[in-house]
Image (spheres, rainbow, N blue to C red):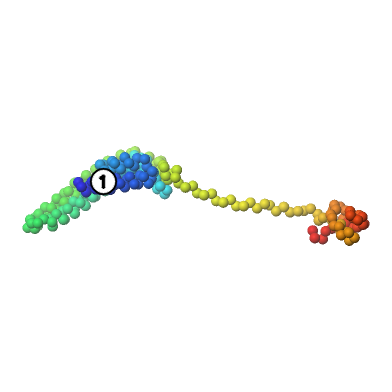
Amino acid sequence: MLYYFFVTVVLAVWVWVDGRRRRCSEAPGLAFLTVFLPILSMPIHFAIRPLRAGEVREGGYSWNVCKNIALAWTACVALVAVWCLVSSLVAPASRLDETVTTDTQRLEGAVEVIVGLRVLFWLWLGPVIVITVIGWLLKTPSIIETGPTGALANQTPQPKPLPEKPTVPPVIQDHSPPSVIVDCPTCGSRYEVPPDMEGQPVNCRKCGELLAARRDARA
């Protein structure tokens, strides 16, 4: 009984810690229930806890509870079977009176172990078949949960947007004709005139010298 209580307390602490990390509001109640009935509280915890990224849960709540109960019952029966085998091997060697461990008694002990394992097998098989059939009937294949879910979905960091590429302004080509300039050798003035005046005589705006407008060679 002491070992059972120790194991259930450890499982209850794990349920509480796991539920707290996943922000499951039902974790405290399930942790308390684990101390007294872990075979029921643990399957419920696995069926309702929020999923993390990469985790998947299929079939709906009822199917997951039934499936987890079958797995929990299998683990319990396996632990009991191992405990019985270990006890049957250790108990005779620990007796003070070694004369009582005759061949007949060893044979009787082996028969008791075999009978006990057969009883455990049927105690395991019956409930597993019943609970699996019930879960299969209640299963909803269309329900597929993909993590993160619940409270974990609201805390998932959103990916940072990629920086926008700087827009390069389009290159505007200047197709306007080269400018026509007037360069006065007398006063050193230099200015532009309309392109249609190329080759025509133009008076300097500063000194009045008659000049010929020419196209700018640097354009």
Q: Is residue 158 left or right of residue 64?
A: right
Residue 128 picture location, percent across and down: 27, 44
Q: Quadrant of residue 42?
A: top left
185 in relation to 43, above or below: below
Residue reaching furthest to the left: 99
Residue at x 14%, y 50% (from the top left corner): 112
Residue at x 41%, y 42% (from the top left corner): 150
Residue 201 picture location, percent across and down: 91, 55
Q: Is residue 190 left or right of residue 45?
A: right
Residue at x 16%, y 53% (from the top left corner): 88
Quadrant assignment for the C terminus? bottom right
Q: Quadrant of residue 29?
A: top left
SS at mark 1 in the image: helix
Residue 17 picture location, percent across and down: 34, 46
Give the amino acid type for the residue marked by disc 1 in the picture: Thr
Q: Which residue is mark 1?
A: 8
Residue at x 87%, y 55% (from the top left corner): 198
Residue 74 picture location, percent across and down: 26, 47
Give the number of marks.
Answer: 1
Q: Nearer the viewer, residue 64 or 134?
A: 64
The crowd level at tag 1 (other Cα within 10 Å; few <14, some 14-19, many 20+) is many
Whether residue 216 is visible, yes or no, is: yes
Whether residue 132 is visible, yes or no, is: no
Q: Quadrant of residue 34?
A: top left
